[in-house]
Image: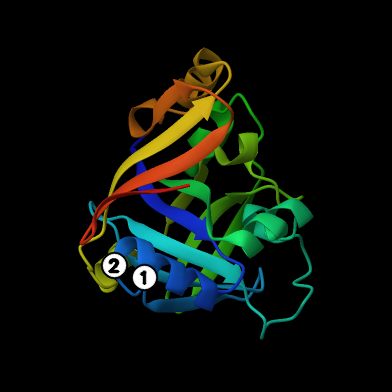
Amino acid sequence: MHNKIDHFAIGADTLDQGVAAMEAKLGVTVPRGGKHEAMSTHNCVMQSGNESFFELIAIDPDAPADPGRVRWFTLDDPTTKARLAERPRALCWVVGTDDLDAVIAASPVDLGDVVLFTRGDRSWRLTVPKDGHLPMGGLLPAFIEWSPGPHPSTGQQDLAVTLDKVHLTYPTPVTLSAILKALRVDHLAEVQAGDAALSFTVSTPNGAVTLD
């Protein structure tokens, strides 16, 4: 099983809000991406090094208000909506795997349903909890398995923004580290003691920046 960071998601109240905030913090304009019709969301994306990408995601105001299921990344949750209204926030990290079924079978926690998405000639399978929550509040990653072909990041713009670290804090870091080890992703994140929180350190044209 080969697991690596696929992308990381920053949630925004609107994409315009998110783009403006990222311009101020990162020194770049994150290009528009696409729409997720099954979730009534849309995004902006760019490369973040090592065949991974940065995703800025928001509810799509032009899509149906009810996509038929709870949106991913807690975007329908009132608490998340209130937090995103203040500023963009780190929501989730996503790990790419070449054996999603094995990840599910080995996981000591419920990672959610495996949902198939398609766009153009590409498809991907992603773990998505039915109620839209994030496992351990986003401290555990979602898992994705892409259909054969080049990683999507290879077609995105490289604006000299690179993901350096995924930071996780938790009151009992040994507990979190054990779960990450069982999922075979403990090498992908730094775990420390503290209140439960997720953040990312990125290198940018403005220097090192933390997104939380």
Q: Dot 1: within a 10 Å radius of its alpha carbon, few (fewer than 14), some, or many (20 or more) residues?
A: few
Q: Dot 2: within a 10 Å radius of its alpha carbon, few (fewer than 14), some, or many (20 or more) residues?
A: some
Task: Report which residue position mark 1 lands on.
Answer: 23
**Of residues 61 and 83, which is closer to you in this image?**
83
- Residue 132 screen position, x and y as percent: 71, 52
Q: Residue at x 47, y 26 (%)?
A: 180
**Of residues 118 and 45, which is closer to you in this image?**
45
Q: Residue at x 41, y 35 (%)?
A: 167
Amino acid type, callout 2:
Gly
**Of residues 96 and 5, which is closer to you in this image?**
5
Q: Is residue 79 left or right of residue 20?
A: right
Residue 149 appearing in the image: no
Q: Is residue 175 above or below residue 165?
A: above
Residue 118 appearing in the image: yes
Q: Is residue 164 left or right of residue 58?
A: left
- Residue 36 screen position, x and y as percent: 58, 72
Instruction: Report the disc number at residue 12.
Output: none
- Residue 99 screen position, x and y as percent: 43, 41
Secondary structure at numbered mark 1: helix
Q: Is residue 89 above or below residue 182?
A: below
Task: Report which residue position mark 2 lands on.
Answer: 27
The answer to the question of whether label 2 and label 1 lie on touching residues, with beta carbons closer than 8 A, is yes
